[in-house]
Amino acid sequence: NHHSTEYNAELRWATDAPWIHNEDWLTKPVSFLEEQWQSGLMMEFIALRDIQPGEEVLINYGDDWQKAWDEHLKNWKPISPESDYNNLTMWTKLPKASNGKDGYIRMEVFNNDKKIPIKTVEEQLVEPYHSALQIMCRVNVNHRHAYLFELETVPFFTRQWESVYDMPMDADEIHSHKCNITERYDNEDSSDDEDEEATGHQYYYSVMVDVIKQVGDEGKVEERHEIESVPRHAIEFINLPYTSDAFLKNSFRHEMQLPNGMFPKAWMEEEQKVNE
């Protein structure tokens, strides 16, 4: 991150990487660099003092960046959801219950509050989640069925969720798929707060997962999986791409500048000749 005065690190040209950094290029004119077809210069971050564990690494983005940021803070005003509907937060206060009513709540709120029930597809018809949120389920849609001919209907599989199969601790592959919540029912083992804390969730869910699989070199097969008794910890919300605050229409944007001292004399002299 940036700090104009209390930075604890800075950029410099690499000093111990001759296989990726050609130091002699720093003495070449810019015209020489323009003729190269591969990269040959490398930068590195160095600490200016001891940085403690957990301490933020700060560099100086430059005076122009700081001036632009100060001007942005001075003139910034929130915009309405109507003019920037893709955003999730819109500077609203989080509700006591994360039910998605007040503003566009980010996925972290839903994922951190496991006691709030997840809405079924039917409930979302009346009170939908924001379009920038997606529900994902940790379920395994692999099976041993072989397709020897082109199918006329969509194969339908139904089973109970199994932690060893769907969410194994030592698996190399994480099975996470877009899913629809078709049903929610009480966890009978969580009759009181102590039981709920022990089991980790208050509800079980039935979910529907549609997948498209590659069969052979050219063929594709659509499958539908209905999986019951899915626990809350196997369901998560994600923020869809391009929906964070960085993509707001009035977000701050400015290039990070390199320190003037990094530019070699040969480059500066050529730039001066061009400007003359």
Image (cartoon, helix red, strand yellow):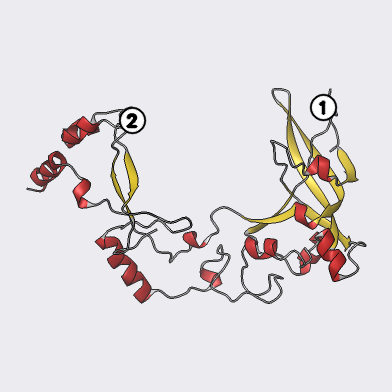
Q: Amino acid at mark 2?
A: Ile
Q: Residue at x 31, y 53 (%)?
A: 48
- For the residue pair 164 and 75, the one nearer the viewer reads as 164
Give the left or right position of residue 199, taking residue 239 as reference.
Answer: right
At 24% from the left edge and 52% from the top edge, which residue is drawn?
259
Quarter where residue 75 is shown: bottom left
Q: Is label 2 or label 1 in front? A: 2
Q: Is residue 159 left or right of residue 170?
A: right
Amino acid type, mark 1: Glu
As drawn, 267 above or below 81: above
Q: Which mark is residue 206?
A: none
Which residue is depicted at the point 33% across and 47% down?
A: 46
Q: Residue furthest right?
A: 188
Is 182 on the left-hand or right-hand side of 253? right
Q: Quadrant of the N terminus?
A: bottom left
Q: Residues within 10 Å of mark 2 (few under 14, many from 20)?
A: few
In the picture of the structure, the residue carrying the numbered disc 1 is: 150
Label disc, if present, on residue 20 of the rendered structure: 2
On the image, the x and y values in percent for residue 169 come to 74, 42
